Amino acid sequence: IGGDSGLTDAGRKFAHRLAEFAHNVVGMKVEKDEVTGEERRTPQPARLWTSTLRRTKETAQYIKHDGKKTPRNGQSCSI
């Protein structure tokens, strides 16, 4: 308990599944055509916030991003 440990094997597997979820659900806008009923999926921007702990950074590393930088406490950080 405590400390700043890295991910376990199970944690890495979860991180990969989370990245898929972020891409397919969080990062997609789903619109349904009222006439045909077909769904259209288009990418939508999203923000991800993590703590500074090693395991949270390791979890987030698999999530695709465009590398934009945003200001944070007077500094830039990659998103």
Image (spheres, grey):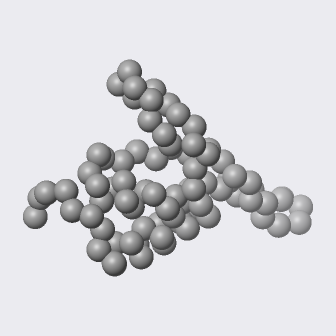
Residue reaching furthest right? 35
Instruction: Give x and y (percent) for residue 21.
Output: 53, 66
Instruction: Give x and y (percent) for residue 37.
Output: 83, 66
Identify which residue is drawn at 46% across, 47% down: 48
Residue reaching furthest top? 74
Nearer to us in this view, 19 or 35: 19
Q: Is residue 48 above or below residue 11?
A: above
Q: Is residue 55 above or below residue 53?
A: below
Image check: 17 left or right of 24? Answer: left
Quarter of the picture holding the N terminus:
bottom left
Nearer to us in this view, 21 or 71: 71
Image check: 35 left or right of 5? Answer: right
Identify which residue is drawn at 35% across, 25% down: 73
Res. 34 image quadrant: bottom right
Q: Is residue 64 above or below residue 45?
A: below
Res. 40 image quadrant: bottom right
Nearer to us in this view, 47 or 75: 75
Q: Is residue 70 above or below residue 49?
A: above
Instruction: Give x and y (percent) for residue 74.
Output: 38, 21
Identify which residue is drawn at 55% across, 67% down: 20
Instruction: Give x and y (percent) for residue 31.
Output: 74, 56
Q: For the image shown, how many numbered marks are present on the structure?
A: 0
Identify which residue is drawn at 37% across, 59% down: 58
